[in-house]
Amino acid sequence: MRQTLFLLICFLSLLGSARAEPVRVFCAEALWCDLAKALGGAAVSTTSILTSPRIDPHDFQVTPDMARKLADSNIVLMMGGHYDDWVPPLLAAQPSTSRHVISVASLAGLGPNDNPHLFDDPEAVRHMVEALSTELTRHLPDDAPSIRARQNDLTAMMTSFADRLKKLRPQTKGMKIAVAEPVGGPLLQALGIKVIDPEFALAAMNHDDPAPRDVARLEDALRKKQVRILLINPTVRSPSLARIEALARDSHVTIVSFDEFPEAGQPWQDWMKARLDRLVAALGVHG
Ligand SMILES: [Zn+2]
């Protein structure tokens, strides 16, 4: 009898300590799942699709396996703003009333023609962390204090990065650069840097042929060294981009490389610091 009671107590205490099922988070881009892990820890299980900046998100095909993982998720995190247009058809094919979808572009109030590279926008990333924190707390009410504490840490880090941008701006404001693809847009905007070829870059992002007039204007600016640098995204390749890069090299215009997004597992702040450090060095400013 005593043994049965002991076993019963063991069983009940096991039940009490057993965690609820982890919250299943599906991420179009790995960075969002890294943030979900940073907020929810072991109470969150994640599935990321775009895990390497070597994958071009603007030209991406889904697989049946991805559709299954999405159908099984409680929370879906995505960039939105035509960045990951492969997600909405997946959502529509697997309707669910309980699944919660968070789009960074929607949170940031991005217009249909605005630059969707919001990894480079501390404010947009902060909005995602806030929305995610609220949603995770709804699923994990007992974890509310720890989620809140981790959210505060992430927010403090983003604020300090935004402060660095503010301090740099007086030196960088009005500088002219060329970009081969609109990666890094919000970062450049925060620094007041003028991108001289937005139409060329947008065509490159959408895998369209750039207009001959836009190509001619960009080539002219590179030949005359009217820009400080050419910013490239190594993942987006095309013959016209290769020609532009070659011309920049021949004209001794510094080429700076910005990845589309961080590798899975690389903390956002480390990734952002590294690209801002490269930009600052190439522009010859300090801070
Ligand atoms: Zn891109």
Image (cartoon, helix red, strand yellow):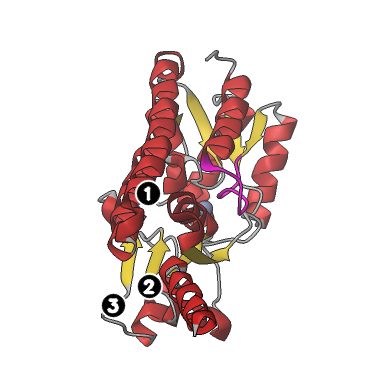
- Is residue 128 within the magenta segment? no
Reading the image, the residue beneath label 3 is 98
Spatial CA span between label 2 and label 3:
7 Å
Question: What percent of the width, then of the height, locates residue 76?
Answer: 39, 68
- The answer to whether marks 2 and 3 mark residues whose Cβ atoms lie closer than 8 Å is yes
Reading the image, the residue beneath label 2 is 74
Observer-nearest of 16 and 275: 16
Reading the image, the residue beneath label 1 is 147
Give the magenta-colored segment's residue range: 258-268
Spatial CA span between label 2 and label 1:
17 Å
Q: Main secondary structure of the magenta part?
A: loop
Residue 121 visible, this angle: yes
Observer-nearest of 117 and 66: 66
Question: Which circle's residue, 2 or 3, is located before the other in the chain?
Answer: 2
- Direction from residue 222 to residue 189 in the image, left or right: left
Query: Which residue is most to the front?
Result: 1
Residue in the image at 42% along x and 26% along y: 160
